[in-house]
Image (spheres, rainbow, N blue to C red):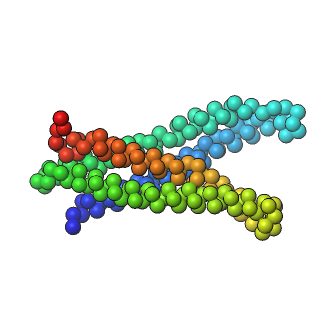
Amino acid sequence: AVPEIFIGGLLGSMTVFVFTSWSIRAVGNAAEDVIVEVRRQFKEHPGILTYTEKPDYKKCVSIVNEAGLREMVKPGLLAVCSPILVGVTFRIIGSYRGRPLLGAEVLAGFLMFSTSTGILMALFLNNGGGAWDNAKKYIETGKHGGKNSDAHKASITGDTVGDPFKDTAGPSIHILMKLYSTITLVLVPLFTGVKTA
């Protein structure tokens, strides 16, 4: 009955998908940085391939650390800023329409839709990613042609996608939902204009 609340709900659902895509992309970007470093080490130290030299593990770990922190800034800002932006924007719109609580109402829709979408998305990512990851292990036991078969080659691709699904995007959505609800509760006076004691 209130289009603004529905719009807030759609925005809440969309942010879950944007957050998911950004977190998966973050893993891909970090992996690219590691690949560049590994190729450099192979080129400069060919003894790594014959086990006569040890690789520089610390460098790869530091690259993953730095990339993880750098790449998760954008998804983190989305998680913190989107409920604030939605609540304040619709509070301003509501003040012009004589509905001072519109910001809080829209934010409630945002929170409900993002939570329900987040639960389903997290279940999909955790279980789908785990299935893709374990499919490769299953094929490597000798099923469907075993190692080096076409099924195994396809399962390597699935594993490459499955790992960021189950290890990064899926678990991160749980944190996203907690952040949304915490920010919304803490900043209620900002969205309603009501001062608390």
The part of the image, by quadrant, that contains residue 110 is: bottom left
The part of the image, by quadrant, that contains residue 39 is: top right
Rendered location of residue 175, percent (x, y): 45, 46
Rendered location of residue 151, percent (x, y): 75, 66
Q: Residue at x 64, y 44 (%)?
A: 31
Rendered location of residue 93, percent (x, y): 19, 52
Furthest toward the bottom, the residue is 144
Quarter of the image for the N terminus: give it.
Answer: bottom left
Q: Residue at x 57, y 59 (%)?
A: 127
> Is residue 175 shown left or right of residue 103?
right
User: Compared with residue 65, is residue 81 higher up or lower down, i.e. above or below?
Assistant: below
Rendered location of residue 107, percent (x, y): 28, 52
The part of the image, by quadrant, that contains residue 84 is: top left
> Is residue 84 shown left or right of residue 151?
left
Q: Residue at x 57, y 54 (%)?
A: 165
> Is residue 152 shown left or right of residue 49?
left
> Is residue 7 shown left or right of residue 55?
left
Decide which of 140, 4 is in the foreground and name it: 140
Asked if residue 170 can be seen in this view, the reply is yes
User: Compared with residue 182, is residue 159 higher up or lower down, i.e. above or below?
Assistant: below
Q: How many marks?
A: 0
Asked if residue 84 can be seen in this view, the reply is no
Furthest toward the left, the residue is 98
Q: Residue at x 50, y 56 (%)?
A: 122
User: Compared with residue 71, is residue 120 higher up or lower down, i.e. above or below?
Assistant: below
Quarter of the image for the C terminus: give it.
Answer: top left
